[in-house]
């Protein structure tokens, strides 16, 4: 088939009834509460124990909560746009599926390919952080791994590292858990999220008695520019709610539950980040917070070592929930792309008993595990934000086309973005602006990844597209 504008931008036809009755459809087990816990599990991980201190020391000073609030505002606008899409098109694939329906296949592939990198690198980076905390807990009992199995080559804090074994193994354990079924996975996630919230509240309550108001002066030593730059970094903390939207096909009542799950998880996590940041900078002067474990550092200064130990365990649990939800999101994205024919069929084949795409789960897990084992954290973490901001921008502007698209006119829409079309346009522009604040290295890596994606698309995906085969038969 010749490459023409018409068939290059073929749109996905939304047939919810066909998907619901198909054996290839995912089983509906999730509620609004499960979705909210998934969002909190993905958003509140290692970042809440590390990011507030680094942002305060390098970007904002004691006013670090403003960076989190600004990032949350941008995310909330994108979240409202996601909510309209997910309640209108409750199919797996999140932003990829939404964009396929309104902008066509080529744009959807670019976005989907970018999101694959986001999920892979997000899982890998969190696994590396999980490994560091886990090894610290082991060291507390006097147990140490051989140096060559404790970190990847090039890790600045570890000399002689070759392979990060704990990071490799935890990703595979998460993959094993996911193959057991979404109900079992969400039960484990819900328990760990409640423990994690309890640990954060414990720090806030204990730390509140050690706040010194003098530590909040000067409040914004780096000015407004520091707050804005900090928000571009803080944005990393909130990207997890994108993974919630990948679950829309497995939700019992997506028209009602998806908006609740997305917005509730964002509100809960914004409060947690803001309150913890306020207490942290009140306990320790911001100039001393440029450390790998600022929360534990603050507790040691307060001579609350028992709380520090609990926080370390809470950090490990918190990162485990992030690994679980982000791995889940990545596998559902691969499922959706494969079901559309753009990736091999084996990636959307479901297990008859658990209704889980087992092959795709293990492939995703193995790749993420290898990345975590052999690539240093500072190299992985750079690659997560830009793909997410790109997805948020496209979903935001896509809402305008969603409402105009006659093809989707028959689909029930129970949630609509308020202040339309101003809010989607502002969200789109804010996401683009935050993308410009990212470093050149991130853009170069992003472009290289997209070039690889284009090679895959034109050599395989274009020729196996189900939408094109259905609508443009020779």
Image: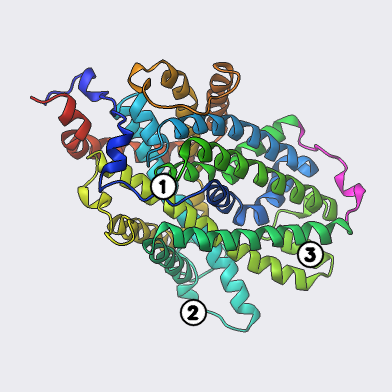
Q: Residue at label 2? A: 146
**Mark 1 element type:** helix
User: In front: 448, or 339?
Assistant: 339
- For the residues bearing labels 3 and 2, Cβ distance under 8 angstroms: no
Rendered location of residue 227, percent (x, y): 71, 35
The vertical placement of 272 against 201, above or below, is: above
Rendered location of residue 263, percent (x, y): 60, 38
User: In front: 398, or 282?
Assistant: 398
CA gap, disc 3 to disc 2? 29 Å
Q: Residue at label 3? A: 299
Span shown in magenta? 211-223
As drawn, the label of residue 250 is: 1
User: Crowding near pointer 2: few (<14 within 10 Å), some, many (20+)?
Assistant: few
- For the residues bearing labels 2 and 1, Cβ distance under 8 angstroms: no
Residue 318 quadrant = bottom right
Residue located at (29% from left, 39% from top): 19
Rendered location of residue 434, percent (x, y): 57, 31
């Amino acid at each position: 088939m010749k490459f023409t504008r018409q068939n290059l931008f073929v749109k996905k036809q939304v047939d919810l009834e066909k998907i619901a009755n198909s054996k290839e459809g995912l089983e509906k087990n999730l509620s609004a509460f499960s979705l909210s816990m998934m969002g909190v599990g993905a958003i509140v991980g290692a970042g809440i124990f590390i990011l507030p201190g680094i942002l305060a020391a390098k970007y904002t000073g004691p006013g670090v909560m403003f960076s989190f609030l600004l990032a949350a505002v941008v995310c909330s606008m994108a979240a409202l746009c996601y909510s309209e899409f997910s309640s209108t098109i409750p199919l797996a694939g999140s932003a990829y599926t939404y964009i396929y329906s309104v902008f066509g296949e080529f744009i959807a592939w670019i976005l989907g390919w970018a999101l694959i990198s986001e999920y892979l690198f997000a899982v890998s980076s969190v696994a590396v952080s999980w490994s560091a905390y886990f090894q610290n807990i082991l060291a507390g009992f006097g147990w140490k791994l051989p140096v060559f199995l404790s970190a990847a080559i090039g890790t600045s804090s570890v000399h002689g590292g070759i392979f990060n074994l704990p990071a490799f193994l935890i990703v595979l354990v998460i993959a094993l858990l996911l193959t057991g079924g979404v109900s079992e996975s969400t039960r484990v996630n819900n328990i760990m999220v409640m423990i994690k919230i309890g640990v954060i509240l414990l720090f806030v309550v204990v730390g509140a008695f050690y706040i010194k108001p003098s530590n909040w002066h000067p409040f914004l030593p780096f000015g407004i520019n520091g707050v804005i730059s900090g928000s571009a970094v803080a944005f990393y903390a909130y990207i997890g709610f994108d993974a919630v939207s990948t679950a829309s096909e497995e939700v019992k009542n997506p028209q009602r539950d998806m908006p609740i799950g997305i917005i509730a998880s964002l509100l809960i996590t914004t409060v947690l980040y803001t309150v913890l940041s306020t207490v942290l900078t009140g306990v320790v002067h911001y100039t001393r917070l440029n450390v790998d474990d600022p929360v534990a550092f603050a507790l040691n200064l307060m001579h609350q070592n028992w709380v520090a130990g609990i926080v370390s365990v809470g950090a490990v649990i918190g990162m485990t929930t992030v690994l679980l939800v982000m791995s889940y999101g990545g596998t559902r994205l691969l499922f959706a792309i494969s079901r559309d024919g753009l990736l091999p069929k084996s990636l959307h084949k479901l297990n008859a008993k658990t209704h889980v795409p087992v092959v795709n789960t293990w492939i995703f897990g193995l790749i993420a595990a290898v990345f975590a084992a052999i690539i240093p954290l500072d190299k992985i973490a750079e690659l997560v934000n830009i793909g997410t901001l790109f997805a948020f921008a496209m979903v935001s502007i896509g809402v305008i086309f969603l409402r105009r698209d006659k093809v989707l006119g028959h689909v029930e829409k129970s949630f609509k973005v308020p202040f339309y079309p101003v809010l989607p346009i502002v969200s789109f522009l804010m996401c683009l602006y935050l993308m410009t604040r990212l470093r050149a290295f991130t853009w170069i890596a992003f472009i290289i990844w997209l070039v690889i994606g284009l090679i895959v698309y034109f050599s395989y995906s274009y020729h196996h597209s189900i939408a094109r085969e259905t609508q443009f038969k020779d």
